[in-house]
Image: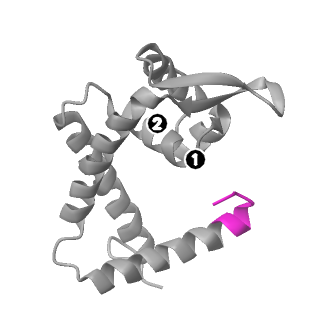
Amino acid sequence: MKSGPSTFGFLLTDAARLLRARVDRALEEAGLGLTPGEARALVFVSHFGPIRQSQLAERMSVEPMTLVGFIDRLEGRGLVVREADPEDRRAKTVRLTPAAQPLVEEIKVVLTRTREEATRNFTPEEIETMRRLLDRMRSNLSIRSGEEV
């Protein structure tokens, strides 16, 4: 088995690291008045919400206390609300407010531009193949770990 900077795992991890850094930079440059973490939280809540704070932190791969800071600031701006989870009153769920939707759309534009930059010189077929393969890999890994996709 080949090891080093051209192995599958290294390339996948490094590409993800570079993409994340580029997305963060693009979000900072967009002038949305949000940190990259706050912007990511809005997109995740838009996609998965209403969602428990603990699940959101796990999906975002951030510490729960880091997420609390993001949510506190977003809630202070009227972009999200925290509510008691109907299944467990001790837990809090997070959902977007209507005021967040225009901002989420702006964030998605930034994300689309960054994705297009990352995949320039790829054919539509290559992009779709990569998406399908990564989706299958995610499913394989989530089944093994018991994590929901």
Point out the tag, 1 or 2, that comes first from the N-terminus. Answer: 2
Give the residue drawn at x 52%, y 72%. 135
Q: Does residue 103 appear to the left or right of 85 in the view shown?
A: left
Is residue 104 positioned above or below 115 on the image?
Answer: above
Does 148 lie within the magenta span? yes
Does 17 lie within the magenta span? no
Is residue 13 positioned above or below 77 on the image?
Answer: below
Viewer-proximal residue, 70 or 18? Answer: 70
Kindly check if marks 1 and 2 are in contact, taking CB atoms under 8 A apart as contact: no
Q: What colouring method underlies this structural image?
A: one colour
Quarter residue 114 falls in? bottom left
Q: Position of residue 144 (x, y in %)?
A: 72, 68
The three-letter amino acid code for the residue at tag 1 is: Phe
Q: Which residue is mark 1?
A: 48
- In the image, the segment drawn in magenta is 142-149
Give the residue drawn at x 47%, y 78%. 132
Is residue 148 positioned above or below 86 on the image?
Answer: below
Q: Which residue is mark 2?
A: 41
Viewer-proximal residue, 119 or 106? Answer: 106
Secondary structure, mark 1, is helix
Q: Does residue 48 appear to the left or right of 99 in the view shown?
A: right
The residue at the far top in this view is: 76
The three-letter amino acid code for the residue at tag 2 is: Ala
